């Protein structure tokens, strides 16, 4: 099983008027300032077939790597028959936004293989310190297109792509419904 993590940037913020201060009445409603104005991000974990396993919603100004552990902690895969649900994937494939020492240590501690390309500044730091570079499993990384296709399927839901909901709880319910639709045959 290969889990993928990615984020979804929305083209429009939901019903917040004007430009206003950096912090405003939308604080706590998963809206944040980014280049496009008020936006939200959906941080998702997918299985190998592109079905969502877990997600979190944050403001558009929140860094991707801050939501890695909360998303991983929400993964619960039911086992066929009795037993606790599975919470640890075989492999994590993510983009450069999730490349950090903390995330790699977290995955190593839990015994999860990872395919995350390093950023240029990390590569230069390793070379400067004389350390070996992390090898990237290119065959596994090519399968990241499954994630992009799944985000495309999620964005077909116009209520998600433009965030019409004002409250974060309502928007989270809409994301849950859209994710459930992806599980249906």
Image: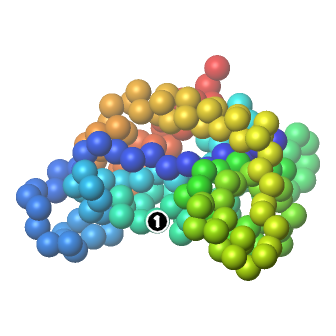
Are there few (<14), some (14-19), or many (20+) residues within 10 Å of tag 1?
A: few
Q: Residue placed at 76% from the left, 41% from the top?
A: 138
* Quarter occupied by residue 67: bottom right
Residue drawn 50% across the image and 36% down it: 151
Q: In this picture, is 55 found above or below 130?
A: above
Left or right: 122 in relation to 161? right
Left or right, residue 185 beside residue 64: right
Query: What kind of element bears circle 1?
Result: loop
- Is residue 173 visible to us here? no
**Observer able to see residue 109:** yes
- In the displayed structure, would residue 53 be above or below residue 17? above
Q: Quadrant of residue 17?
A: bottom left
Q: Residue furthest bottom?
A: 129
Q: Position of residue 165 (x, y in %)?
A: 28, 47
Residue identifier under label 1 = 63
Q: Quadrant of the N terminus?
A: top right
From the viewer's perspective, is 106 left or right of 174? right
Q: Give coordinates of residue 64: x percent, y percent.
A: 51, 61
Seen as rendered, the residue at the extreme right is: 82
Compared across the picture, whether 145 is left or right of 1 comes to left
Return the x and y of residue 42 as percentages of the image width and height: 46, 51
Q: Residue furthest left?
A: 18
Q: Could you say which quadrant of the image residue 58 lies in?
A: bottom left
Who is closer to the viewer here, 76 or 97? Answer: 97
Residue at left offset 79%, top offset 36%: 139
């Amino acid at each position: 099983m290969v889990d993928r993590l990615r984020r979804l940037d929305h083209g429009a913020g939901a019903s917040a008027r004007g430009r206003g201060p950096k912090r405003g009445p939308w604080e706590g409603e998963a809206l944040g300032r980014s280049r496009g104005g008020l936006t939200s991000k959906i941080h998702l974990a997918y299985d190998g077939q592109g079905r969502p396993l877990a997600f979190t919603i944050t403001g558009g100004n929140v860094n991707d790597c801050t939501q890695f552990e909360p998303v991983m902690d929400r993964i619960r895969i039911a086992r066929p028959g009795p037993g606790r649900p599975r919470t640890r994937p075989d492999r994590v494939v993510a983009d450069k936004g999730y490349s950090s020492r903390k995330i790699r240590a977290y995955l190593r501690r839990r015994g999860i293989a990872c395919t995350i390309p390093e950023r240029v500044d990390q590569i230069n730091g390793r070379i400067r310190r004389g350390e070996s570079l992390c090898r990237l499993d290119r065959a596994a990384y090519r399968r990241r297109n499954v994630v992009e296709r799944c985000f495309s399927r999620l964005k077909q839901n116009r209520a998600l792509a433009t965030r019409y909901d004002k409250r974060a709880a309502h928007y989270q319910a809409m994301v849950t419904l859209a994710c459930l639709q992806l599980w249906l045959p």
